[in-house]
Amino acid sequence: MLAFFRSGLWRDLLALLLLTVVLAGLLAGGAGRIVEAYFSQAVAGLVGAPGEYDAIVHLKREAGEEALRALDERLASEYPGYARKEAPTVAGHRNILIGLPKARRDQRGLESLPTVLSDVPGFDGITFIVEPAIVIRDVHPGLRGELAAQARKIDGVLFSFTNGSSVWAVLRSAADVARVQGELEELVREKVIIEVQLPVAMSGRASEALLWELVTRLEESEPGWKASALEAGESADERYALLQRARQVIAELGAVDTAELKAGLLELADEIEGAFAQTGGLGGEDLGYVIGAFRQAVDQVELLEARLDAVAGELKEAAAQGEATDLIVALLLQRLFDRLGSKEVEAPASAVDVQELRTGIEAIEETIRRLDQLKLSEVAARLRRLAAVVPGLDQDAVQEVVEALDALAPESAASSRRVSILVEGESERERVAAVAARAAGASVRVYPQSAGVVQPDARTAVLQLLAGLKQVVTVFVALLVMMLVHLFDVAALASFGRRLAEIDGRSPGRTTAALALGFGLLGAVMLAATVWLASGAEAVPILWLVVVGGAAGALFALASERCGPVDREVFCAAVSLGISEPDILREVVVPEGRPGVLYWLTRPARMLGRERARRQVFPGGALPA
Amino acid sequence: MLKVRSLSKRFGERVALNGVSLELKAGETLALLGPSGCGKSTLLRCIQRLVPPDHGEIWFMGEPVHELEGDALKEYRRRVGFVFQHFNLIRHMNALENVALGPLMAGLPRPKAFGIAREALARVGLAGRAEAYPAGMSGGERQRVAIARALAQKPRLILWDEPTSALDPILVDEVLAIMAELAATQETAMIVVTHEIPFALEVADRMALMDEGRIVAEGKPDEVLFESRAPVAERLRRVYEMRYAGLYQQVLDRAGRNGSERSRSLHRSHGAPSPFSWRRKGTVMG
């Protein structure tokens, strides 16, 4: 091997390497850029310029032009100054690109867009393409609000909004994409969600105890871990739990015999009026009875109010947690409060001003103490008013509501329940799951999940894909050029090396190994340098290039007798003339082989054999002037 | 001029040369015969250092060839010409360039190198074929170009490795005639590996028989061929008698009329000249 280089051939090899790298680099880089530019233009043609549009509205094609008109109307009314462009129809869906006006391009504007357009005929969903933005997908319902809030605090984030299970962080500038993405990934990485699947037979109280036990054990197991129970979100199990809770409350409400209470109050009012009419006045004992009954009635109503507040509170809370829950709760509330005598969907205001009644009672007592003339007629009137506001919730109505709830509950009524725990400060999900599983015991199943998947916006994701494609094309073209150079030149060089070794009497095995090593190194340097030159700072991992280039170089060296064999006898003839190795390479081996890079590199210095080459180019023998 | 001492060469398990020794004087022609695979070509290639011997010594004009390296080795190779069985011309060079390759690469100026090449081509009767390429030449012409290529180096010794084996019978004579003329001038020592027994008898000063990597007989050609008791010598005798016996008698009859000096000496020793005179009319030599 050293003799090979001592002979001065290294200059030819160096020239071969440099020229190959430069040519292949230019070709590969050019090819990659052409591909990237072509597809980038295609993307821009489809979804507009960066930042031009914010969402794609999907309309069913059969909804026709009516859908488009309705869409325009809705947008004009809610988002004046919007931009619209129709994109290609795909799979029976018309895709309309929507650009929101600057004034409405914020959290509220974007989050309300699906609701605003929900009643457009043929509406079949929205795909947001806000940019520049980073999206955290598959976020647990209990974590969405928190992640959105944390995202807003990151420098460079204009605002954040949620859409389904995704949290979007819209950026001020595209230059911040990489940094913000990194920060969000860091944010998400340190959160692990543990889904604990509880057995069916476990009671609510035991479940809660287990939940807090798990939280405590998780926090205690590692110093940096912080665990907390996550609110249940929109899931079949959670919806079922909500419905069951509502059912329970309604049933308890039904246990309050409001009809009897109402009747009692009316009866009391009648008695007071009757007594007043008969006697013209009531004695202290009668008054005391009346007031006691009045107080009792007020207590009962207060109790009822409290229960109504509790129900309303729970259902209202559930209403804040998602559309589907809203719908169910809205239905429940609507149905319930229809029965309860209220037409409002929201939680009812207090049906009775208990405080006012109590004040009234105290006033009455005061009056009695002062022995003022008791306005019993007013008392009776008040009792009647009280009776009027007592809900007429009869057992049939309760049963009807309960049956409605049962119909809405999923068939998985008998299914197991899940609770979620958020663990912060640890990125290895399996580790957290192992701790939770140990703490929970064998009867409980534990599943680790990530807090979400961070991705750039659609265009950036596509551009990243395109960048990847560009790298693939660059590497492919570089590899192709390198293989051609190996086929045309390197194989012949390797065979030449073998011939030299044979003349010198060196071991064939060692020669093969040396050639494989040497040309493997050449191949590695060639490919790595070519791709680096073509791609610049976006180079593919260097180790991969070194391995592939090295393998290709070694392969061609090993297969040199098949790819570019140097005729042993012609070589011997040249050696027998006492010609030096570089001269043999330049005058005999290279011209006899394929016309590769070395052929043209050595051509200027070649002394013989040029006439035939000229005649091959100019068959008539006439040389250009 | 050339001394080979106990030369040995093994290719894997196969012993190609087993302690071969020989000597050659300046201007002498040695014919080397033997069955295929006995080591004749290996011996020549070892002498030319195209194949490195495992053991032994090679001395050329007092220089230890077996120890030469680098430029000294290249210089030695220039002084020892080699003519291959299959010509081994360089396809992309014409006849003139093939012949001029050696002198040009040795550093001679282009005009001088090409001048020497033209002279060498003329010597082998191919002056008018200088621009021809090997693909457009006959086998005999190609071998003559190869001979001219060797001659252009003005070697002190020429090694011939079955130069006529790849030629058809018509062309064999062309080449043998040149070889005979060269041998006759005694300017250059030659070792000729050949199966052409008559040529060896006629032209060679000495003959050596090889068998299984060893020289089994050596001496004057007719003595070696007709008197050696070595098994290979007996086989050669049988071949010679089978192929040439009838014709030989005719030659014996003609020998007295116009044979060469060698023929006449053979005639004197055996009573008739050899029929195989390669002195052709029109062949330009010297």
Image: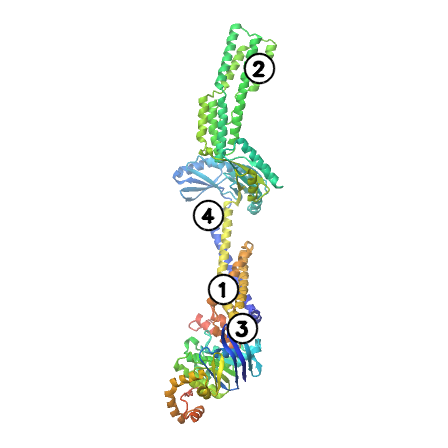
Count of numbered marks:
4
Q: Position of residue B247 (x, y in %)?
A: 37, 88
Secondary structure of the residue carrying numbered label 4:
helix
Task: State the mark number for residue A567.
Answer: none
Residue at the spot of label 3: A505
- Asked if both marks, 3 and 1, belong to the same chain, the answer given is yes
C-alpha span from label 1 to label 4: 45 Å
Number of residues whose C-alpha sits closer than 10 Å to that of mark 1, classed few (under 14), some (14–19) or many (20 or more): many
Q: Nearer the viewer, mark 1 or mark 2?
A: 1
Single out the residue that lies furthest toward the top: A279
Residue at the spot of label 2: A361
Badge 4: chain ID: A
Badge 1: chain ID: A
Quadrant placement of the N terminus of chain A: bottom right
Q: Nearer the viewer, residue A4 or A208?
A: A208
Tag 1–tag 4 contact (CB < 8 Å): no
C-alpha span from label 4 to label 3: 67 Å
Q: Nearer the viewer, residue A237 or A458?
A: A237
